[in-house]
Image (tube, rainbow, N blue to C red):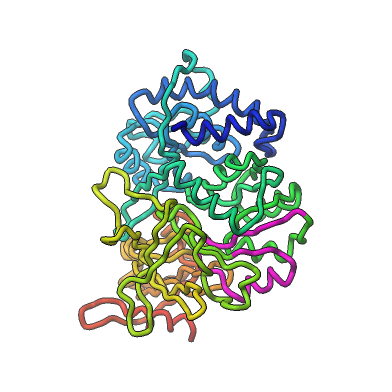
Amino acid sequence: MKNLFKLKIEKALKTAPQKKALVSASGNLTWEELYSFAEKTSAVIQNIFYSSEYVPLLFLNPFQFTLAVYSIWFAGKTPVPLNPTAGGEELINILEKLKTGKIISDLQDEREFFSAGNEVILWDKLHEIKAEKSTLKSFSETAVVIFTSGSTGIPKGVPITFSNLNANINSILKKVNLTEADSWLASLPFFHIGGFAIIWRALALGSTLFLPDSFTSKEIIKVINEFRPSAFSVVSTTLIAMLDSVSPYENIKTVFAGGGPVSGGLMKSAIDKGFPVYKVYGSTETVSMVTVLTPEDFSLAPESAGKPFDGITIKIENPDYNGVGEVCVKGSQIASSYLDESGTNLTEDGFLRTGDLGFFDNKGFLNIAGRKSEFIISGGENINLNKIKKALLELDEVQDAEAVGIPNDKWGEMLCAAIVPSVKTNYEEIKKSLEGKLSNFEIPKKIIFTNEIPRTPLGKPKQTEIKKLFFR
């Protein structure tokens, strides 16, 4: 069977060679130009990564990143997008898992990673490297490896195949009438599956992909107003900003809202204004969205995560007396394993355990009751609460601490911290002390100073009582 990537790009090339494939402030390419560029660049990548299947990417520019992905796919290898705000130690650990000391990047940095014996190939210097024309005859079936943190905070690589991605877009097409005449906006960071999958969706349909200069809400809104894409994805923070900055337009077909909790009130405001908002739920391992709450179904279950897409089966494992149990998912888009690990978090009958708690109501809508692990999703970012707690306890001015997520319309869940200080301090001093230790999105938005953290006799935090501290 021919590689899905080759099938899709050759179809786009044959159908509309002069149609715009990529459009951004950094440059525009037709399908013919993209094909030619990627094919040529693939020979250089094959030469550099001759002994490695994986090609790590550390990019800030979305247009250049997308060119790199196409070139890597043409080279028969697998791109691994990394978070450009990640710490050096995390990047080093990931490269060790990938068994490569090389990385392609469009930025220079002084972090520890760049002085740890790893080779950084700058994107703008790549074409100075001489390489013979590619003679590749086989392609990797793994489209991308996305790293996500597990319950221990140790990054886990999730290999995602072209078939996984294709099953996802095929499910979407059964809910939303999107064709090659429509356009997509890359509106989420590419090191998240929700962002990376958009590259494939545009390619699968032969549609134009619009690319912003960055993934800030301000830049996303600017590109929406300029190019008016047919489909894009947003987190709560961007959707809120859109309500005041974007007016619905004729060719807009779908706004996928997810990456964390999206309140019914926010979705109603967007729908009332005329936006076709589809609330979705999914994860890295489920290869993006597996349930959807459509605008038509919204009034039936406004706070739910919707119903499973066609091809997706969801069951609730070990439900309690209220029907709440772990959400488990099965379908052809679900990733089958973790990188270099013997198995996945699967049930005996092949369902993926998501780590989320939920239940189905009597109308068949899935409701997410909370997260089983010590993670929250805030503004589309997965945050390990134990990691935040550890960073706080390492500060001289902190005697005891716990991190929690508080429901919030803007962030989905707002990262907060309860702290028992060892000396007189304030929020700004704590924030400054955490800078450099944590990514910006991992610094608590709100801190409560208290004399004691509510705990059980065994020393475990009483999450409900801690959260009450923020509502006094």
At x 43% / y 22%, what residue is drawn? 137
> Residue 213: percent from the left, percent from the top?
64, 43
At x 47% / y 18%, what residue is drawn? 134
Image-based side of 325 in relation to 187, left or right: left
> Residue 20: percent from the left, percent from the top?
70, 35
Q: Is residue 472 above or below residue 390?
A: below
Q: Is residue 379 above or below residue 45?
A: below
Q: Is residue 216 magenta?
A: no
Res 375 → quadrant: bottom left
Q: Observer-nearest residue: 277 or 315? A: 315
At x 46% / y 31%, what residue is drawn? 2
Q: Is residue 267 magenta?
A: yes
Task: For the N terminus, give its image quadrant.
Answer: top left
Q: Is residue 8 above or below residue 463?
A: above
Find the residue positioned furthest to the left: 458
> Residue 200: percent from the left, percent from the top?
55, 43
Asked if residue 55 can be seen in this view, the reply is no
* Residue stretch in magenta: 251-278
Q: Observer-nearest residue: 105 or 430? A: 105
> Residue 83: percent from the left, percent from the top?
46, 46
Asked if residue 155 can be seen in this view, the reply is yes
Res 300 → quadrant: bottom right
Q: Observer-nearest residue: 62 or 299? A: 299
Image mark count? 0
At x 30% / y 41%, what residue is drawn? 97
Image-based side of 312 in relation to 345, left or right: right
